[in-house]
Image (cartoon, rainbow, N blue to C red):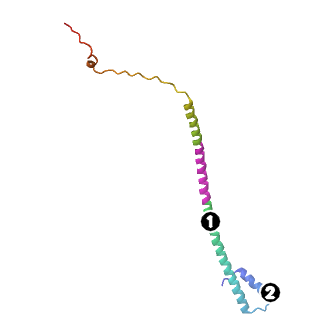
Amino acid sequence: MNFTAGSAAALIVACVALGGCVTRDDLREAQDRIDAADHHAGLAQARADEAYGIGSRAQGRADEAYGIGSNAMRSAERANGKADMTASDVEQLKRRVANLENKPQPHHKKKIRRQHSTSSSTAHADEPKPNNS
């Protein structure tokens, strides 16, 4: 039997209320009911503790998910900033290309290529040889 201060107080109140007409069987039955109520209260406390543990684990998971979400948000903001910078770079390059396309280009003179002969005998084949006598 689990005898607590609460069950003792309940037993004393029951004795005083009945004014001494209580038998031993009545006291045992009252004590059994008090013990059963105490047992049920213990079970309820155990379930409440279990529920608190589950809630604590759920809170831990929620905190973890919040941290992951925050990291993802920061990564997305960085990527968005880089995309904005890239978009502005692309626009700047488009303006430069358009400017270069509209700018008149200077005309270069073509080089005149002359063919030079490499052998002296072929260059002078048509000329008569001088006679030194």
Q: What residue is shown at x 57% (from left), y 34% (from top)?
A: 98
> Which residues fall within the magenta stretch?
64-84
Asked whether 133 or 91 is in front, the reply is: 133
- Taken as a whole, is the magenta stretch helix, strand or loop? helix
Q: What residue is shown at x 64% (from left), y 74% (from top)?
A: 47
On screen, residue 128 versus residue 1, left or right, reads left
Q: Secondary structure at mark 2?
A: helix
Q: Per the image, is 25 magenta?
A: no
Packing grade of label 1 (10 A; few <14, some 14-19, many >=20) is few
Q: For the residues carrying marks 1 and 2, which lies nearer the camera in this image?
A: 1
Asked whether 9 or 111 is in front, the reply is: 111
Q: What residue is shown at x 57% (from left), y 40% (from top)?
A: 90
> Percent position (x, y) of residue 113?
39, 22
Give residue 17's mark: 2
Mark 2 and mark 1 in contact (Cβ < 8 Å)? no
Q: Amino acid at mark 2?
A: Ala
Q: Secondary structure at mark 1?
A: helix
Give residue 58's mark: 1
N-terminal label among 1 and 2: 2
> Percent position (x, y) of residue 9?
75, 82
Q: Picture quarter containing residue 46?
A: bottom right
The quadrant of the image that shows the N terminus is: bottom right
